[in-house]
Amino acid sequence: MANGTLHSFLKNKGRTLSIDERLKLVHGIGSGLEYLHSLSVFHGDLHSGNVLIDEEQNPRISDFGLACTIGKLQPGLSYLQRLSSTSNVGAVRWAAPERLSGCKPHPSGDIYSLGCIMFEVTTRP
């Protein structure tokens, strides 16, 4: 993507971003996550390094290496693993506390990670 990862985008352009631009990023990531969850997909490793920013500063969730399905498998998503007890929690800084204590992946973990991203986007200079 034209603007790299969200992490690098904030590092390079964070000081010039308005609150409206920051809220647009947060809203886009939240909408993307809502869409994934509507397809019964749990990302499992959502963090600012796994969000890409396109040329119009729209966020794009990427890296589905730890993604798994929740409930009924949607058509076309058979390459994703079923929800399992995988011990890989992904990026620890953005992982829900219950994942660090060995609990199974759950959609609420994505919501916790989204909250961490929201904090990062709205507070990073």
Image (tube, rainbow, N blue to C red):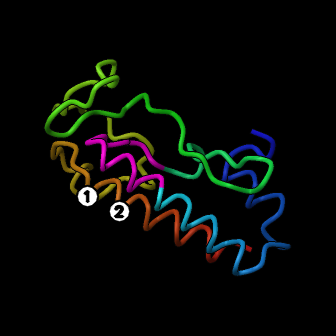
Compared to 22, does 55 lie above or below? above
What residue appears at the point 74 percent right and 56 percent down from the top-left corner? 57
Q: Amino acid at mark 1?
A: Ser
Estimate the x, y position of residue 39 in percent, counting from the top left.
30, 42
Numbered mark located on residue 87 in the image: none
Estimate the x, y position of residue 66 in percent, counting from the top left.
37, 32
Numbered mark located on residue 112 in the image: 2
Q: Badge 2: few (under 14), some or many (20 or more) residues near its Cα, within 10 Å?
A: some
Q: Amino acid at mark 2?
A: Tyr
Kindly check if marks 1 and 2 are in contact, taking CB atoms under 8 A apart as contact.
yes
Residue under pointer 1:
108
What residue appears at the point 33 percent right and 25 percent down from the top-left corner? 77
In the foreground, 51 or 76: 76
What residue appears at the point 25 percent right and 58 percent down from the top-left corner? 108
Bounds of the magenta segment: 32-46
Compared to 120, does 7 lie above or below? above
What residue appears at the point 39 percent right and 50 percent down from the top-left corner? 35
Within the magenta stretch, is there residue 75? no
Numbered-mark total = 2
Judging from the image, what secondary structure is the residue with disc 1 in?
helix
Image quarter of residue 34? bottom left
Report the side of 91 relative to 28 (left or right): left
Compared to 24, does 88 lie above or below? above
**View extreme (top): residue:** 79
Q: Badge 1: few (under 14), some or many (20 or more) residues near its Cα, within 10 Å?
A: few
Report the side of 68 relative to 22 (left or right): left
In the foreground, 93 or 70: 70
Report the side of 91 relative to 100 (left or right): right
Which quarter of the figure is the N terminus placed in?
top right
Judging from the image, what secondary structure is the residue with disc 2 in?
helix
Within the magenta stretch, is there residue 39? yes
